Image: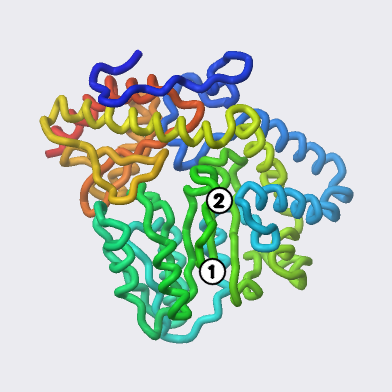
Amino acid sequence: MTSPLATRLAPAALLLPDGRPARAAWTLSESAVHINHGSFGAVPLVAQEHQNALRAEMDSMPVGWFPALPSRIADARTSIAAFFEVDASTLAIVPNASAGASVVFSSLPVTRGLEIVVTDHGYGAVTMGAERLARRWDGTVLTAHIPLDATAAEAHDAVVALFSDRTALVVVDQITSPTARFLPVDTISDEAKRRGIPVLVDAAHVPALYPAPTAGLSCDFWVGNLHKFACAPRGTAVLIAQGDLVGELYPLVDSWGARDPFPARFDSQGTLDLTSYLAAPTSLTFIEETWGWDTARRYLSELADYAEHTIAAAFTAFTGESHLVDVGMPVNALRLVRLPDGIAGDQESANALRDRMLDAFGVEGAFTSFDGVGYFRLSTHVYNTAADYDHFAEFCVPALVEWASASS
């Protein structure tokens, strides 16, 4: 049922070829409302079954499995590279985007007293890695402040203003996790390249949301998760690298492939369970063959439009204020809605609110904070429908308003 508060039309829900709802292809609990795909993803049943079969094969004949594993990973890597529209020689598979960033931090040639430029929209774990690298070399991390509503040009200028002769690395998000917006990694990378400064693009949320996401980018390193919007089994991400520093990149675990060139050396990781790598193409193929990625992306964006305006309008009915958020460079499937004052003013309280919402209403949502303001970060996928967000507007919004009032 369409919410009377909605100011956008709800897109028709996607169906499986046999007429069942798209959600039937996932094993998500029927007792919960899942509107936080962007944090941990969700793996379709067909990919789960493929990974389980691979694990059974591994455990039934380990001596046959592990020596042959690097060549199988190379085949999966070639398939994944085709999805990204890049050459397989530029792409390594890593456990997650943070692991890919850690590879860069541990491999990059640096000098004492270095400076690393990050932004205040960065993912906490990656920023911590940059800080650890700086500490090891008596260096400094400089943080560019970018207003939430900054334009591409304003965001570019804020980052580039911190460049100096001591800048050893720039770390910038293509889509920001806490604030659900783009940053202009293209122009930032171009300017950094002109000055000879390496750039690491944290694109954790980008894979599958946009086609060929690295096309035209001059960054040295690009990391993105496949377990999020690409729906691959968790523990699967890519590190795409180009330029003179590619030869410096090594896996976090030294193994027998250490003497191989990049990215083949990443295909050998001892006895780690890498079945997620092998099953990842199954998720990509499932969505392509069921709906097509172009159709899926269009649905995600239209549903996010509906959800954003429906939930914001529900808050406005209580507060009389606008709860829509200008994020400067919006994302198709990730949106922010401003929460009432008094809740989620920092990330710790935002995480507590996430847990409280799950306990009280069975809603798997995401809450975040930026500059002392709390936000609900909604995300969409093909298994979501307008009813998921109508439910949040009807039941969760009143509770959030009440909790905010009680905390003030």
Residue that sits furthest to the front in the current view: 216
Q: Nearer the viewer, residue 193 or 27?
A: 193
Give the class, few, some or many, for how many residues have Cα within 10 Å of label 2's Cα (few <14, many ≥20): some
Quarter containing the C terminus: top left
Q: In the rendered view, would you say 269 is above or below 407?
A: below
Q: Which residue is mark 2?
A: 212
Q: Report which quarter residue 292 is drawn in.
A: top right
Q: Are marks 2 and 1 in contact (CB under 8 Å)?
A: no
Residue that appears at 25% across and 25% down: 7
Q: Report which quarter residue 352 is drawn in.
A: top left
Q: Element type at marker 1?
A: loop
On the image, the x and y values in percent for residue 266 come to: 70, 61
Q: Element type at marker 2?
A: loop
Q: Which residue is mark 1?
A: 220
Chain-order first, disc 2 or disc 1: 2
Q: In the rendered view, would you say 174 is above or below 331?
A: below
Amino acid under disc 2: Ala
Query: Mark 2 to mark 1: distance in Å?
Result: 16 Å
Q: Nearer the viewer, residue 323 or 65?
A: 323
On the image, the x and y values in percent for residue 108 come to: 55, 75
Q: In the rendered view, would you say 325 is above or below 94?
A: above
Residue that appears at 88% across and 50% down: 63
Quarter containing the N terminus: top left
On the image, the x and y values in percent for residue 247 come to: 66, 74
